[in-house]
Image (spheres, rainbow, N blue to C red):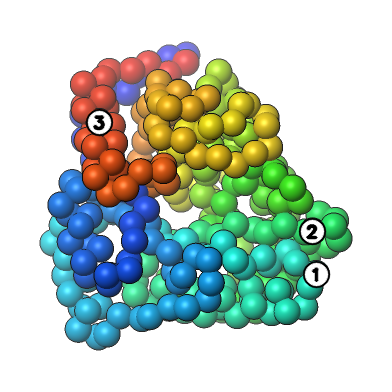
Amino acid sequence: MAEEVYESDLINMVIGTHMSIAKGIVKTAENVVKMNADTMQIFSRNPRGSNYKDPTVKEAEEFQRIRREAGFGAILAHAPYTMNLASATEKTYEFACTVIREDIRRMDELQIENLVFHPGSHTGIGEEAGIANIIRGLDQAITGSENITVLLETMSGKGTEIGYRFEQLKEIRDGVQHPERIGICLDTCHVFAAGYDIVHNLDGVLEEFDRILGLPLLRAVHLNDSMMPFDSRKDRHAVLGGGEIGLEALLNVMRHPKLKDLPFYLETPLDDAGHKDEIARLKEYLGETRSEHI
């Protein structure tokens, strides 16, 4: 049965991109407005290290004013790549536990709606042991009193990554003490590389997600094309329309009636000017399009 999506259904779509906060959170928010974006993703701290600098009270207040007046959609913070909650190495695991605990608190205080992280790589101890470590790490970090939601990201499955199957994400969420604080971020590049055919069978992929996890748990979409082919288990982002997924398939993701109300975040290999153009192009395509989904 076809379900039509009209232009009027797409007017309030939330599209943002990953933004640097090197010059401060206020400057970042101002740049989002200049880019004609609707929201943003930021790193919760240095993505390749452990350093961070929290905004001053004045900066935080100005940031809140800008996002409120501009009508930003849900903001997404991304935990650093250096943390691995699945690790069996004591030093690595303790670092990851500290980072996720601190960043949940810090981003919650900044009134960020969601914090996403890569579940981790088990590095040889096996998926079940890695998942047990992730669950234990989340339990020491989440109190249940937060407003922020912690999102598990769908992964490509490279190496010993955990999170490339929906069942693994379900096992993590089902195992934590506060599952109500756990949601999912779907990365189009990652699921495509993991073997979920969002190009030819998007409805089937979403039905599988709904059966295993439940679509209400899906809180955000990382919108990326893939440099690598389907089911490659390799994570290489491409600009929209410049990879193996293709622009039309990605537009179909955005137009889909079960996804169109979610916030979309670009993580494509472009600078701010390139992302501004990419967002404008998406809005042009979506504004001009009336689409059917079967």
User: Residue 43 lies in what quarter of the image?
Assistant: bottom left
Is there a contact, CB below 8 Å, between mark 1 and mark 2? yes
54 or 234, which lies in front?
234
Q: Residues within 10 Å of mark 1 (few under 14, many from 20)?
A: some
Q: Which residue is mark 3?
A: 281
29 vs 114, left or right, is left
In the figure, is residue 66 to the left or right of 285?
left
- Near-viewer residue (267 or 130): 267
Q: Earlier in the sequence, mark 2 or mark 3?
A: 2
Residue 229: x and y in percent read 61, 26
Q: Are marks 3 and 1 in contact (CB under 8 Å)?
A: no
Three-letter residue code for mark 1: Ala
Measure the C-alpha gap from mark 2 to mark 3.
Answer: 40 Å
Residue at point 19% right, 48% down? Answer: 35
Element class at badge 1: loop
Which label was assigned to residue 88?
1
In the picture of the structure, the residue carrying the numbered disc 2 is 123
Q: Which mark is residue 110?
A: none
Which kind of residue does numbered mark 2 sit on? Thr
